[in-house]
Structures are given as structure tokens and as C-alpha cells.
Amino acid sequence: MSADIVDLSAGSIAQAISKKSISCKDVTTAFLERIDKLNPVLNAVCTLNDQALDQADKADQRLARGEAARPLEGVPILIKDILHTKDVRTTYGSLIRENYVPGEDAVSVERLKDAGAILLGKTNTPEFAHDVNTNNQIFGTTRNPFNVNVTAGGSSGGSGSAVAANLAPIALGTDLGGSIRVPCSYNSIVGLRPSPGRVPVYPTEFGWDTLVEHVQGPMTRSVADLGLAMSVLAGPDDRDPSSLPASTHDFNVAASATQSLEGQRIAYVGDLNGLFPLDPEVERLTKAAAQQFESLGCIVEEASFDESDIREIVTGTRAFGMVGRYADLFDEHKDKMTLQLVNQVTNALTLDVRTIVNAEKMRTGYWHRVREFFEQYDYMIAPSVGAPPFRLDEALPTEVGGVAVERYYDVYLAAYAFSVTGLPVMAVPCGLTGNGLPVGMQIVGHRLRDDSVISAAAAYEYHCADNFVRPDINLDEVKPVSPALATPGLAVRAAIK
């Protein structure tokens, strides 16, 4: 019975609970048993909510009294460990916050719980969510359910691994430069980097998240579950002065695969004119997936825009955030920080205000080039990351597709190139490489049209279900993380004038 329950979608769980064909406690128990079985190896869940079963009991009692079932009644959720969860430890993956227990929920968590969801616990993250490999000094490394000896990605790698392994049907992640999209690609799941402000962010030190926004979004196995989560998560909140007005679109309807894409124009932008290294297998799978939209009545063309100054833009705008969020912590607690974060803050502190301002000016010009290019199309499609997940038992690769690269982290510019635009982006799977590793792509939509990218993803999922592969989890061949695997943290360097 437990095995059947953990295979259910969030929508199916909520529907079964509303019909009283299954109890909230049965569901919660099944997922906790699944975590107990797989998590000792995957290390996706870093802290359990010891009140989960009690909360499930209370939900069952509420329903027994005849109260109406809520949209996510009894649906288990997991939350990235940089988002506040009331009375549940929130470490940010940092020794600096190792014993921090918030007194309130993040708005996103509050909304999921108010909709009836049951918090199972927190998912692992690199320190303060700033690396593409999920590893920290408190909990260690998260592994990938498709192959436990490769990375689950970052920085929402715990959420990505957990959802792929059926530890929960919905998890929350965050995304600055790709931290939802990269783990979705590496774990063959779907996720949304929403328009900034679509999902309110609180608490935060930056009510107006200046420059490139760090957003929160759902990660799920299916587009329908993502639409269900967004129907709960989206909407204004005065605690976030940057939050958007309520959408006029129904995210559940958008995710239902009923919207026609006939005549829609799609630009497959590939490696963005050579911006990032692109593994041939990743290119083959993403291009083939993009071309599948032709069977949906779309017109798919290969085209791109001028992204020649994206390195300068990323360097300057990212530096602003690194200094704003971590410089004071760096001054006081440098000895407790991971090397990845130390490297990024150190690099950021070398830049002056004029350099950062110039980067934001360049970003404005970049936006207008993207905007003008996008006037010809309804969507853009690109790889989520330029390479499959790397191994944990070896040093960080120095090649992509057999070609030597100076900076392996350049493969992640595939995601960052769209972060700086603030456009909504869906991440969806494209299938597996020859050695069984997942690959994903990004569907980029027009400004504020989160519903549109969800609809495109739903239609793609319906017609290309074979690309949505579930892992055959083998826990028996775990190799130690290599001491030579030194991930430096994303620090894009460019010749800024």
C-alpha cells in the first residue's frame, strides 16, 4: 500500500483524501517510510518535521468533523533549507545558522500549509544556496537517484533528488542563476522559475530584491502538480512590496494540457551563439525535444540574439547580491564558511560600485535585445545546463563533450542568461543520455506569462511522456565523494571596463 501511495501525484492524493478513500496519516506515514528507506544514501532530506504525523492526524480529525477538504489536503511537501519553517530547524546549509529555528513560516510555506499540505521536512542545500553541487559542512552531499555517484545539482539539489525519488510529490526550491532549473534537469523533473514577485518572498532582508531576483518556485514530477502548487503559491502579499497583483490566469487550467499551441512560434536558441559549452548528447536531446513542438502545430526555428555581454552582466549584478547578503557574515564568520561561498564573496568584494552600475546598464541593453528578438516568437527553448550531471567520485570535469574547457561552470550560463531577464521559465525533462543520465530544457515565456510556459510544458508532457523518465534507484554501488571534487562556486569573471 505504501509503495502505491508514494507513486501518486499530489493531485491524486488530494482527491483521494477528499473522498476519504485514504487518510492523511496513511499518506504521511507512507512518505516518511520512503524517506527512511532511501534518504540514508540520497541525503536529500536534511531535517524531518517531528510533528508531521500529529499534523496529519489533526487534518483527518478536521475532515471527520465534516469540514471541506482544501486544495492540498494531506499532500506531503518538502521545503528547501533556506526557507523559513516555523518551529523546524532552518540551517541555510551553514554552520553559522546550524541551530536556527524560525518563529514564523515563509509566505510560500504558509500558503502551502494553509492549503492543507503536510510539511515532512527540509531539503539539503549548499551554503546559503550558492553552488551547483548540493553539499555543506552540516549534512554533507546529496546524491542523484538516477545514479547515486553523480550530483543532484544545486542549489535546490535536495528538493530535486527528493521529488525524483518520490520522497514527496511537491518540494519548494529557489532560483537565482538556475537553482531550480539545474536540479530539474539533473533529476528529470519539472520546475518553474516564476516571474519575480509572482510568489511573494518573506521574510527577507531585501524587500526590493535589487538587480537579479532570487525567486521561489515549485518542483514536481508532473506539470499538473506544478500548476496545482502555483494556484496556491501565487498572489500578492503586503509583506513583500515587490509581489505582483493576482494573476488573471488559472494555473490549474494552464497545466491541464488543454491549451492549443497551433501556430505558436518557437526559437530554439541552442548554445546562444557559443555562450556556454554544450555537450553533444545534451544538444541532441534538447533539440529533438524542441522539434517535438512541431507535432503540436508549432513553428520551430533555430535562432538567437546577441548575448555577448552576459558575462559582464552576471559578474556585476551577482556581486551586488553577494556583498549585500554575505559581506557582514564574511567579516565575522569567514572561518565557518565553505570555500565555495568564501570564493564568491571574495571575488564580489573586488568590484567597485561603478562596475556594478555599469553591469546593470548593460543588463538593460541586453533586455531590450531579448525583447526585440522575442517579438517574433511565443517561446524560446534552450538547454537548462550545457552538460549532464558530473560525477561525485571524481574531480570536477575539465572537458565538456570531450572538448577542454577553461571554466567548467560556464555550462551553467545556459540558465543564468535567462535569469537576468526576469522572464518566466519552465524546466522540463528531455530524456536520458546513453549512460542513463537526465537532461532537461528550459521553456522561456513572455514577461509575466507564467501561465503560458506552464501550458506549453503541459502540452509537451502530454505528447512526449516518454521523456518524463522515473529513476530505477540502485543504492548498492555508492562510492565516496572524491576529495578532489572541489567545486569553486559560481564566480563568472569577465573583462569589465
Image: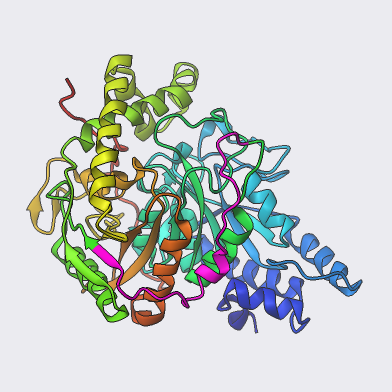
Q: On screen, 255 above or below 444?
A: below
**Total labels drawn:** 0
Q: Position of residue 141 (x, y in %)?
A: 42, 50
Start and end of the magenta stretch? 240-266
* Residue drawn at 32 percent across, 61 percent down: 378
Q: Is residue 395 magenta?
A: no
Q: Is residue 86 above or below residue 100?
A: below
Point out residue 452 in the picture as x, y percentages from the top left corner: 43, 62
Q: Quadrant of residue 383?
A: bottom left
In the foreground, 334 or 260:
260
Residue 22, image quadrant: bottom right
Residue at the location (27% across, 59% down)?
377
* Horizontal relation, residue 53 to residue 440: left or right: right
In the image, 378 versus 292, the foreground residue is 378
Q: Quadrant of residue 376?
A: bottom left
Residue placed most toward the observer, 354 or 379: 379
Q: Position of residue 208 (x, y in %)?
A: 52, 30
Residue sitting at x 22%, y 57%: 387
Q: Is residue 457 something that shows in the picture?
A: yes
- Magenta region includes residue 241: yes
Position of residue 484 in the picture relative to residue 12 (left or right):
left
At horizontal 26% and vertical 64% (from top left) the residue drawn is 266
**Residue 289 sits above or below residue 496 on the image:** below
Where residue 330 appears, as percent x and y from the top left, is 44, 21
